Image (cartoon, rainbow, N blue to C red):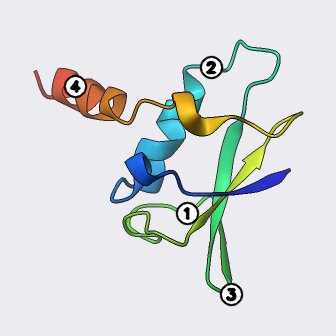
Amino acid sequence: MYLVPVPEGLTGKTFVEAASLFLSDRDARDASLLVGLYRGERMMLNPVGSEAGPLREGDELILLCPVLPDLSGLDPDKVAKKNDKDKT
């Protein structure tokens, strides 16, 4: 389990949007699963609906994974593209 700062590109995204980015890699041996976040002193595991609100600078993601992940390759635009596709 790892705590990692929210990458700048995920700031403003919902927890569900952020979690969906990690699902595309589920077949990889070193896949990460987003299970919650820390905001200040508060831990939120699997927040539902708008419980967590948008991700903020200073939040930390709680990830289950075998090794510390490199989040530099995350593409937050994939969330927007998927959401646009779902609306059509």
Instruction: Assign a secondary structure to mark 2.
Output: loop
Circles 4 and 1: CB atoms closer than 8 Å: no
87 vs 26, left or right, is: left
- Please give the residue where the numbered disc 4 appears in the rendered image: 86
Determine whether the residue tagged by mark 3 lies in a helix, strand or loop: loop
Image: 41 above or below 82: below
Q: Give the image quarter of residue 82.
A: top left
Q: State which quarter of the image contains the C terminus.
A: top left
Q: CA distance from mark 2 to mark 4?
A: 20 Å
- Of the residues under marks 1 and 3, which one precedes in the sequence? 3
- First along the sequence among labels 3 and 4: 3
Q: Which one is nearer the viewer's eye here, 84 or 40?
A: 40
The residue wearing badge 2 is 25
Q: Quadrant of residue 39?
A: bottom right
Q: Residue furthest left?
A: 88
Where residue 60 sits: x, y (%)? Answer: 63, 64
Residue type for callout 1: Pro
Query: Can you give x and y, in whole percent of width and height, for residue 40 in the image?
Result: 62, 84
Q: Secondary structure at mark 4?
A: helix
Q: Which residue is mark 3?
A: 41
Disc 4 residue type?
Asp
Query: Residue placed at 43% from the left, 68% from the top?
Result: 56
User: Is the C-beta separation of discs 3 and 4 under 8 Å?
Assistant: no
Q: Which mark is residue 47?
A: 1
For marks 2 and 1 on the same chain, the one whose residue lies earlier in the sequence? 2
Which kind of residue does numbered mark 2 sit on? Asp
Tell me which label, 2 or 4, sits earlier in the chain. 2
